[in-house]
Amino acid sequence: MNKMKNKASCPALFLAAPASGQGKTTITSAIARYFTSQGKVVRVFKTGPDYLDPQILAQASNGHVEQLDMWMAGENYCQQKLYEAALEADLILVEGAMGLFDGEPSSADLAARFNIPVAIVMDVKGMAQTAAAVAIGLANFRDDYSCYGLIANNCSSERHAQLIREALGDKLPLLACLKKDPEVALPERHLGLVQASEVYDELEEKFTLGCEWLQDGVTRADSASPLLTLPASVDFYPSEIEEVEPLLVGKTIAVAKDVAFSFIYQANTRLLEAMGATLTYFSPLKDTQLPEADALWLPGGYPELYAAQLAENTQLQTQIAAFYQAGKPVLAECGGFLYCLNELVDLDNQHHKMLGLLNGQGSMSGKRGCQGMQKALLPEGEIHGHAHHRSRAIMEIDAMGYGQRQRHPAPGEAIYRDKKLTASYLHLFFPSNPRLIADLFTGQLQVEDKEKLLAWENYQSASVQTEATQTQSLGG
């Protein structure tokens, strides 16, 4: 393939920060809506495993938002998705995760790999010249990426802006000085942002105000600020990735989807459809009839907020239990895993009867929890994913195995299997192993059975052994 001939060029900007909580999502969504309102096609990506931010960003940009993470998804996958976006977009925005250099790989690694300039978003409350020093330090900490400038968030006054501007001098552009404005801030709850579907109209108002807030912030920073003009184009190239095989042709997968179960990567559903599967969605909160299907997917979400309503829907619970007893494939992730247990104890310490497919109890654990990248190690092979939860599962059955943490030797999340149900706190990123996903949803090992089972047996022999009754409290 002649890469130069097949390259796609598109303006691109990477929004990163020195830490979490600096306002990246609010600012990224405001930029996306500003250019979208100008008639531009804006494609937004989110770094790392995140479900809630992409919902906000998708509404702001009127387009789908995907995750970019070179560990979870793979470098070739990220390269291909950026290339595909460049073919159709007028602007590509990438929102980073945590601090600029946090994680392996970090936001800086991703920006450097694909030559996307970085705009530093920083909450400057309580500092002035120091904000400039930190921003200049971030911009020059490494020499393998370029820094577009500083977006100073929570900049209280004209004098505050002047002090930062003077301290930056000609070392780094000041792109915007944004006032603190509660009307623009995005709503939150215990695991992060509220789901976009719950506050659609409120978000529309915030996006409108956000555009005005952004324009005012640019004016306060520098009349020559380039933030509201398209940045320079970046060249993106197609990657050499394997074609998706039609391993799920003729299969129908029922997918739980409502406000209780909404942690679904668009990349996952698009992969299933590319493999030939028909997806049919249902609501465990409202529907009393389980759709006709060959397999069932119970994704993560907020079942603890709707536990009473889930418990009341006994008709659907009976149908899901019959589906499981019939030996049909079921994948349950995080919130879906909790739904499979005997009961769930909510935030008010109320007990609610769940599906009872696995002998255990789920309960909320307050603010502390577990998060981080992990591999799921299964008889079918290994697949990348992550954990993020603030609950614990007290199980009365043995785990089939454990996830493998990306950067820590301790065992990861417990993985359970009974009949053809696979359940865990782990959220799986399907494109990291499409063939394994096909195996899960068909309930059989399709290829390389001996090699996969041998690898599994080797892992099992070296894994941590547990007692019949174990307590899992690694996250929520």
Image (cartoon, grey):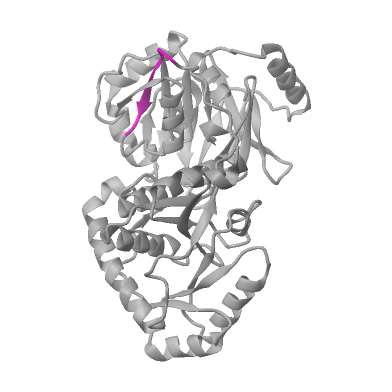
In the image, is 469 to the left or to the right of 41?
Answer: right
* Quadrant in the picture for the N terminus: top right
Verify whether residue 376 appears in magenta.
no
In the image, is 292 to the left or to the right of 116?
Answer: left
For the point 42% across and 20% down, the residue is: 276
Tell which of 215 and 304 is nearer to you: 215
- When the figure is inspected, residue 335 is found, relative to residue 274, above or below; the finding is below
What x and y, as percent, mark residue 438?
Answer: 52, 20
Residue 73 shows up from this direction:
no
- Residue farthest along the top direction in this orientation: 326
What x and y, as percent, mark residue 233?
Answer: 48, 60
Tell me where the magenta segment starts and ends, as one range. Answer: 249-257
In the image, is 388 to the left or to the right of 317?
Answer: right
What x and y, as percent, mark residue 316?
Answer: 30, 20
- When the figure is inspected, residue 41 is found, relative to residue 165, above or below; the finding is above
- When the figure is inspected, residue 21 is found, relative to residue 191, above or below; the finding is below
Residue 278 shows up from this direction:
yes
Tell which of 80 and 163 is nearer to you: 80
For the point 66% across and 51% down, the residue is: 104
In the image, is 157 to the left or to the right of 138?
Answer: left
For the point 43% across and 86% down, the residue is: 161
Tell how many labels.
Answer: 0
Q: In which quadrant of the rendered view does residue 458 lie?
A: top right
